[in-house]
Image (cartoon, rainbow, N blue to C red):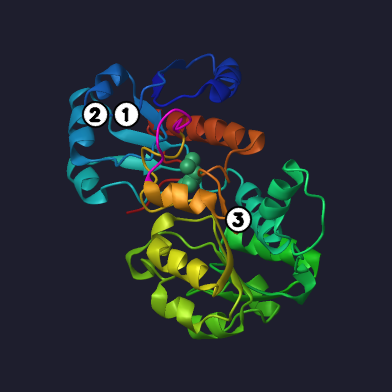
Amino acid sequence: MKIFAFSIREDEIPYIKSWQKDHSDVEVGFTEKPLTPDTAIEATGSENIVVYQQLDYSSEIFEALAEVGVKTLSLRNAGVDNVDFESAGKFGFQFSNVPLYSPQAIAEQSVTMLQRLLRRSKELDTKVAKGDLRWTPTIGREMRVQTVAVIGTGNIGRLAIKILQGFGARVIAYDKYYHPDIERQKLYVETLEDIFSQATAILLHTPSVPELYHMINATSIAKMQDDVAIVNQSRGDLVDIDAIIAGLDSGKIFGFATDVLEKEVGIFNEDFTDKPLPTCIADLIARENVILTPHTAFYTETAVRNMIILAFDAAKTFAERGIPKTLVRY
Ligand code: COI
């Protein structure tokens, strides 16, 4: 049995080796190259492939994989929004993902970013680096006097709520599907309008689905409290970035922290130290009240280990003609 993995980074190799040691009956191959119609051929002779990429899984990719006899893909990440399921279905592909590699990693970063915005840490760090050790005017806001709205109460959102409650924040929540723990705590408000009118800070933890496209836009921002802080550690297309920039310019938005952007593919996880950044990103980075991280909320040792181990486990199950627990139903 052979499993082949694409887009493997240096930091993932020790976990692959460790998995391989525990599964000596499986031959494992990997490449640092992403899966494309041209690289698919490297999977020849493998029952299954393990992949992570932000590029779309397109019809051309499925065709190239089918030609080399691969029909199952084990994604080593959670989101499946870049899979063309219509084409995949035509070729009869099956997928698994790793939905729970570490919800904690994202929830921790989300609350940390809110805390950084409220305490104006980017501004303060810049001042201190220049030798300006004065307090004013960089006064912060405390968590316990915030009404923090968590939109999306899946695994990540619920952990974020727990961490926020540890800080003493008043939490309100919104989701189309109620979770019993959050319901028991009476945290749900009925509508997004309630969220926008009550929250002094908003954390986004929903998946990218068509009905939530640009849910944060000029109209919703206008309904928010003045000086609202917004944190997006979920998906870039939940937010109309031009509306955010307008809200930052007008002073309506106190601060914005984002780990994701709608057009991040080909930009995040690339080195721009010797070339110009795209204008919108340069603009965001230059702002004292914006914290931009390049899709690193997931990037912890624990998460990366779990992504590899759980994706290879699922790949092995597929290769043995079984159904992994994390089969993606579409
Ligand atoms: C996901 O797991 O869906 C993520 O967004 C993290 C990915 C960039 C590895």
Callout 3 secondary element: loop
Badge 1: how crowded within 10 Å, few (<14), some, or many (20+)? Answer: many
Is residue 304 part of the magenta span, yes or no?
A: no
Q: Which residues are magenta?
A: 270-278
Could you tell which of marks 3 and 1 lies nearer the N-terminus?
1
**Vertical placement of 75 versus 240: above or below?**
above
Disc ID at residue 35: 1
Q: Is residue 249 left or right of residue 171?
A: left
Q: Is mark 3 within 8 Å of ligand 1?
A: no
- Please state the horizontal and vertical placement of residue 24, each as a whole percent of the image: 54, 14
Which kind of residue does numbered mark 1 sit on? Answer: Leu
- Please state the horizontal and vertical placement of residue 162, each as a whole percent of the image: 72, 63
**Pair 3/1: label in front:** 3
**Pair 3/2: label in front:** 3
* Frontmost residue, 255 versus 166: 255
In three-dimensional space, the C-alpha distance between marks 3 and 2, rounded to whole angstroms, equals 46 Å
**Pair 1/2: label in front:** 1
In the rendered picture of this protein, how many numbered marks are placed on residues? 3
Could you tell which of marks 1 and 2 lies nearer the N-terminus?
1
Q: Are marks 1 and 2 in contact (CB under 8 Å)?
A: yes
The N terminus: image quadrant: top left
- Please state the horizontal and vertical placement of residue 307, each as a whole percent of the image: 54, 36
Picture residue at 62% right of the left edge, 56% below the top: 110
Q: Is residue 273 left or right of residue 225?
A: left
The C terminus: image quadrant: bottom left
Asked whether the viewer can see residue 188, the reply is: yes
Callout 2 secondary element: helix
Residue at which label 2 appears: 65
